Amino acid sequence: MATESSKIDIKDLSRQQLADWLEGRGRRPFRSDQILRWVYLRQADRFEDMTNIGKPLRADLEAAFVNPRLQVESEATSQDGSRKLLFRLHDGLHIETVIIPEKDHFTLCISSQVGCRHGCRFCMTAKGGFTRNLSAGEIVSQVRDVLQQVSAQGGMPLTNIVFMGMGEPLANYDNVVQALEVITNGDYGLKISTRRVTVSTAGLVPEMADLGRDTRVNLAVSLNATDDDTRTRLMPINRKYPIADLIAACQAYPLPPRRKITIEYILMKGINDSMTDAERLVKLLRPINAKINLIPFNEHPGSDFKRPDPSRVIQFQELLANQHYTVIVRHSKGQDIGAACGQLSAKLKTEYGGPRTEN
């Protein structure tokens, strides 16, 4: 008999992998959809609760698989209502996930890796280096678990998912795409519209093309500079995929109708916030069907960068808007609890030393 530690998390299996497992045991493959509906739509934790599945198959599932929840190690609540969850994974590692309240819904910012290897100088996650990829099940579990929590509390629904937490999603490509299938599937999955799911990348050019071929979700590209020297200092990945290559990849990206690529531009005082930078950005983005998110830098301990003056942010925005770009200044929520853009680190620090329910 398999021990708990040797069993597979059923959420790590794709629909086809589960169907193949069933067929290999003489079961009808269509049972995979029934099982997955219990896991995702009905939020069942125990195989014995899957009452429209025969007892022998339930016993087989129990013998082969587990269906755990992520363990909430700590939780903190921001003054703006954002909540940061520190999840403990099965091997003792940690990731952070942020629940962000909007006007009439919640957005969930999820992680795709433990740490990150790309070394962006303005990002707290990068300072801890890279440990490992998350499995497809660990990615999906962030959404599944929070959906259950939000539903139980009533009120606003969780409708939007952004892959903007810890890690580079496209560096964990296969697991991210498998998770996206579950998150967006309208039959057995979590039923989040592809129009409301965004994958953000630092600019992995080959995988951008793959994502456009394999999914219909939104793409966000972290640009953050308008010349290669500056971008390379900020984002070492620019050495491999310089701005010209990144812009060409965006131009070639197969956008669904009425959608745009989101260009993320973190404004850092004296680094990339000059009017010359704004003018260069206008020219760079001409070939792309793009909208622009300007994000004033979220300062954190040990950072070499500063937040621009509010007047400079307005000037930068106005120059872009006058050139007919859709441009929004994103004032990241959760700054007081280290949950804003670029602040996630998943370290057990004194910030988690207070009450266990604070984010």
Image (spheres, rainbow, N blue to C red):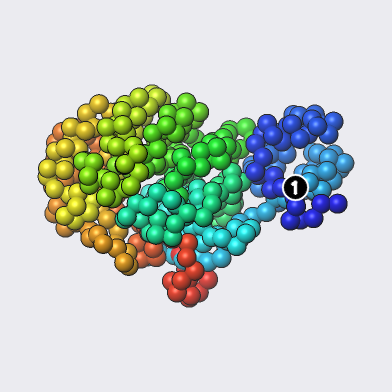
User: Height in image: 282 above or below 233?
Assistant: above
Residue 314: image location, x then y, percent:
16, 49
Q: Splitting the image into 4 quarters, where does residue 203 fall?
A: top left
Residue at the image point whose x is 17% and y is 49% from the top:
273
Residue tagged 1: 65
Residue lying furthest right: 56
Total numbered labels: 1
Q: Splitting the image into 4 quarters, where does residue 260 fall?
A: top left
Q: Is residue 113 left or right of residue 336?
A: right
Residue 46: image location, x then y, percent:
75, 51
Q: Is residue 141 left or right of residue 168?
A: right
Crowdedness near tag 1: few (<14), some (14–19) or many (≥20) residues, C-alpha within 10 Å: many
User: Height in image: 265 above or below 193?
Assistant: below
User: Height in image: 28 above or below 98?
Assistant: above
Q: Nearer the viewer, residue 304 or 332?
A: 304
Residue 60: image location, x then y, percent:
83, 43
Q: Is residue 353 left or right of residue 225?
A: right
Tag 1 secondary structure? strand
Residue 32 in view of the camera? no
Q: Is residue 207 left or right of residue 183?
A: left
| Amino acid at the residue labelled 1 | Phe
Residue 14 in view of the camera? yes
Residue at the image point whose x is 44% and y is 34% from the top:
207
Q: Nearer the viewer, residue 74 or 12?
A: 12
Residue at the image point whose x is 79% and y is 39% from the top:
52
Residue 49: image location, x then y, percent:
77, 48
Residue at the image point whose x is 59% and y is 49% from the top:
138
